[in-house]
Image (cartoon, grey):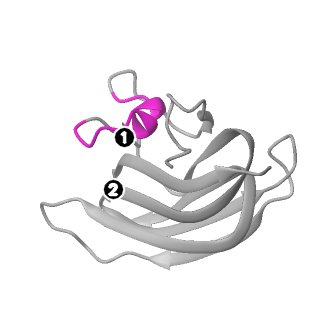
Amino acid sequence: MDVATAESGAQILLATSSDSGNPPENMIDGRLDTFWASTGLYPQEFILSFTTLVNLKTIKVNSFQVKGLKIERSVQQEPTDFETLKDAELSPSDASLQTEEYKVDSSTAKHLRFIITSGYDHFFSVHRLSVEGSPVS
């Protein structure tokens, strides 16, 4: 079950840049043809929040021109006390989307923070986030 959709109640609580034509909420609308675009400079980050604590299985990110990506989790009610889940360097993708999938079994989160530490260009885009998981019972 994808728990990172607006339909499932997930929200983007914070994004360090915003373009009215490509808002951060586009990342969780379930589509690849919409996206959040940075306004330049690094690092950039956003926080994805779930309605409840979730068991994480897989995090999938579809992006363009992202080089350095750090994913952190918080189990707190408020988005604080983050700890690193993944620190990755993505390969360049030329004209196609980068598709990165990270297995994170045995982890829970109420919030995920994504930090784009560097890119292959001044601007990047994140087209879709998908988080396979289930609410903690």
Mark 1: which amino acid? Answer: Ala
Q: Is residue 18 above or below residue 2?
A: above
Mark 1 Cα-neighbour bin, 10 Å: few <14, some 14–19, many ≥20: many
| Mark identifier at residue 37 | 1
Mark 2: which amino acid? Answer: Ser
Numbered range of the magenta stretch: 22-33
Mark 2 Cα-neighbour bin, 10 Å: few <14, some 14–19, many ≥20: many
Q: Is residue 86 above or below residue 5?
A: below
Q: Is residue 76 left or right of residue 95?
A: right
Residue 110: image x %, image y %?
Answer: 75, 48
| Number of marks in the rendered image | 2
| SS state under label 2 | strand
Q: Label 1 near label 2: C-beta < 8 Å? A: no
| SS state under label 1 | strand
Task: Pick whichever, 110 or 42, lies toward us.
Answer: 110
| Mark identifier at residue 63 | 2
Q: Nearer the viewer, mark 2 or mark 1?
A: 2
Which residue ends up furthest to the left in the rendered image? Answer: 95
> Which residue is rendered at x = 28% and y = 64% of the image?
98
Task: Pick whichever, 35 or 40, lies toward us.
Answer: 35
> Which residue is rendered at x = 72% and y = 68% of the image?
107
Residue 32 is a magenta residue: yes
Task: Pick whichever, 3 or 11, lies toward us.
Answer: 3
Q: Is residue 51 above or below residue 55?
A: above
> Which residue is rendered at x = 87% and y = 49% of the image?
76
> Which residue is rendered at x = 31% and y = 65% of the image?
99
